[in-house]
């Protein structure tokens, strides 16, 4: 590895018996330290991963309902504005957005 490289251990599958494989990449440092500026930068990330990151910064979590976890998201979002993030994602992917029982839900429209 060289300076700036990142080593990630990726599960080969959901099967617990499968080995973990190493993956080396070189992420942009600006994206990795964006949280210090109150920002989250996503580049073609699954909605499940992006929501997981945004939920780290709030007491009102975003919950994905149904088959929306694999949708892709990119952009720069303010970590203190999970409601704005959820509304932007809903508009981008044509999802229903609802505040319900202390959480924000994103789902396909019924």
Image (cartoon, helix red, strand yellow):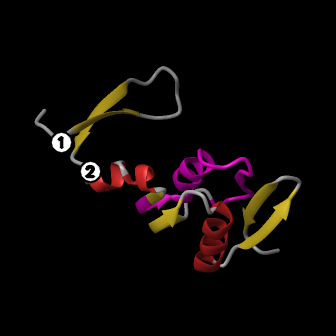
Q: Secondary structure at mark 1?
A: loop
Q: Residue furthest left?
A: 2
Indicate whether residue 47 is drawn in magenta: yes
Q: Secondary structure at mark 2?
A: helix
Q: Position of residue 63 (x, y in %)?
A: 72, 53
Whether 90 is drawn above or below 27: the answer is: below
Indicate whether residue 58 is drawn in magenta: yes
Quarter of the figure that contains the N terminus: top left
Task: Please state the extent of the stretch shown in magenta in the rendering.
Answer: 41-68
Quarter of the figure that contains the C terminus: bottom right
Whether 81 is drawn above or below 110: the answer is: above
- Please give the name of the residue rendered at 58% of the width and 47% of the height, measured from the top-left corner: 52
- Please give the name of the residue rendered at 52% of the width and 28% of the height, measured from the top-left corner: 15
Q: Position of residue 65 (x, y in %)?
A: 74, 57
- Reading the image, the residue beneath label 1 is 4
- Please give the name of the residue rendered at 53% of the width and 63% of the height, measured from the top-left corner: 78
Contact between marks 1 and 2 (CB within 8 A): the answer is: yes
Q: Residues within 10 Å of mark 1 (few under 14, many from 20)?
A: few
- Please give the name of the residue rendered at 26% of the width and 50% of the height, measured from the top-left corner: 27
Q: Residues within 10 Å of mark 2 (few under 14, many from 20)?
A: few
Whether 58 is drawn above or below 43: the answer is: above
- Reading the image, the residue beneath label 2 is 29
Q: Position of residue 93 (x, y in %)?
A: 60, 75
Image quarter for residue 3?
Answer: top left
In the image, 88: left or right of 43? right
* Number of numbered discs overlaid on the protein picture: 2
In the image, 45: left or right of 96? left
Question: Disc 1 and disc 2: Cα gap in Å?
Answer: 8 Å
Q: Which mark is residue 81?
A: none
- Which of 74 and 4 lies nearest the eye of the viewer? 4
- Which of 5 and 38 lies nearest the eye of the viewer? 38
């Amino acid at each position: 590895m060289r300076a700036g490289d990142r080593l990630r251990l990726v599960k080969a599958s959901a099967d617990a018996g499968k080995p973990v494989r190493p993956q080396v990449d070189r992420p942009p440092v600006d994206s990795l330290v964006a949280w210090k500026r109150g920002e989250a930068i996503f580049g073609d990330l699954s909605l499940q991963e992006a929501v997981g990151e945004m939920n780290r910064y709030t007491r009102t979590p975003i919950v994905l309902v149904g088959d929306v976890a694999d949708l892709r998201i990119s952009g720069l979002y303010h970590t203190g504005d999970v409601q704005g993030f959820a509304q932007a994602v809903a508009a981008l992917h044509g999802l229903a957005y609802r505040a319900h029982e202390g959480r924000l839900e994103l789902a396909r429209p019924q």
